[in-house]
Image (cartoon, rainbow, N blue to C red):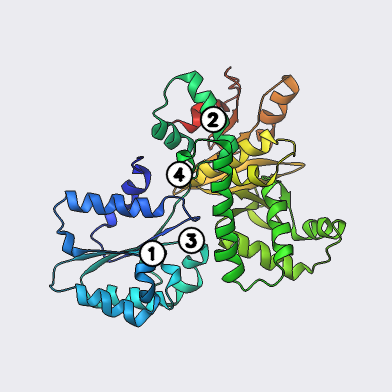
Amino acid sequence: MVIRERYLNALRPFYDQDLIKVLVGIRRSGKSVILNQIINELKNNGIDEKHIIYINFEDFDYQEYTDPKKLNKYVKDKITDDKKYYIFFDEIQNVDMWEKVVNSLRATKNTSIFITGSNSDLLSSDLATHIAGRYVSFKVTPFTFSEVCELLNISDKKDIDDVFKDYIKWGGMPQRFMQNTDESKKTYLNDIYDSIVIKDIIRRFNIKDVDLLNRIVTYILTTPSQTFSPESLRKYMMSESRGVSLETLYNYLDYITRANLISKAERYDIRGKKILTGKYKYYLTDLGFTNILSEGKKEQIGAYLENIIYNELIARGYNVKIGNIENGEIDFIATRFDEKIYIQVAYILVDELAVKREFGAYGKIEDNYPKYVLSMDKFDFSQNGIIHKNIIDWLLEK
């Protein structure tokens, strides 16, 4: 088992605070495992097991407690003294009016509450109503490449290269590493995909046109890292003999994003210092979903690598935008607190023209923040203060 130290290290300062700890991420990305790792740490630190309350709302044994009144009574009946109780609610979105229960427990009892959810809007409309300003949030992603190498105990360079090829193809969903054949991996990822589409999109948002939803999801999952607008997607649908309104497309894209199946990256005008609306890039939360839907289609290795870098930046806690410059773009502008970096991603710098293109993209950026070009090349092309790194080496950095 991989100890997900990146998340535990960020969460530890809040273990004993009354701020609600919220872990949000795609289904089966490892949120429950992180909760259990926190519980184990608490026990190792001497916390009595009776003061730890854990409920997984996807476990049928707790089905009745999706009723907020029953849940509130169940938890309060377990609180029998004035010492701190550590409460863990897994997949809280299954509980009606959950935010009222959580806020009541936080306000009236000596508690430290941890919750997980699979819908990104858990951090918007629901939380904003009752517990705004009383929570800290953490986005949980599937395994990063360094976590995969840790899981598989891989350190030899040749083995690392092979594992990276597998990572590009099948992604980093934790339990897929328990599958031993390509067929079982595909079946497992299909099950997750169906669960997300049915539970987190169709049921939650009462989707009527399931065929249209599937077409949109398939289009996005098989064209990762591409810049497009709802208008361009509408034209594509019309070419497939599917007329659809822009409003419907906007809504469906929002639903897919809120289910954490994809992430939307905004474009930022570097010179004008403003967000540009209308065109975005969508990145897959896990590349394995491309493989289950794009059978027979040509691999897009450059797009896959860009998607992996985006997910790694998110996992490292960066806010990521696409940089817009005159007649071009910078792949990523990543900010974290006072830190800011620029990143260009390429597959291979095959010739001088490719080197000039990737490094030259920074020519119109006048600030002194660190600038990187990442590629699969093993030779160091660093020049003019711009740092070149091998993608695998960068992914394995601590």
In this rendering, the answer to whether 68 lies above or below 15 is: below
Mark 4 vs 2, N-terminal side: 2
Image spot of residue 18 (x, y percent): 27, 66
Q: Which mark is residue 118?
A: 3
Q: Which residue is mark 2?
A: 164
Residue 287 seen in the figure: no
Image spot of residue 157 (x, y percent): 48, 19
**Quadrant location of residue 213?**
bottom right
Disc 1 element: loop
Residue type at numbered disc 1: Asp
Disc 3 element: loop
Residue at 51% x, 62% y: name it: 120
* Foreground tag (3 vs 1): 1
Image spot of residue 209 (x, y percent): 72, 69
Instruction: Judge by depth and name the residue closer to the eye, 94 or 314.
Output: 94
Q: CA distance from mark 2 to mark 1?
A: 34 Å
Residue type at numbered disc 4: Pro
Q: Which residue is mark 1?
A: 59
Q: CA distance from mark 3 to mark 1?
A: 15 Å
Residue type at numbered disc 3: Ser
Disc 2 element: helix
Q: CA distance from mark 4 to mark 3?
A: 16 Å
Instruction: Judge by depth and name the residue closer to the eye, 113 or 338.
Output: 113
Residue 10 seen in the figure: yes
Residue at 21% x, 66% y: name it: 85
Mark 2 vs 1, N-terminal side: 1
Mark 1 vs 4, N-terminal side: 1
* Foreground tag (4 vs 2): 4
Q: Which mark is residue 174?
A: 4
Image spot of residue 81 (x, y percent): 12, 72
* Foreground tag (1 vs 4): 1
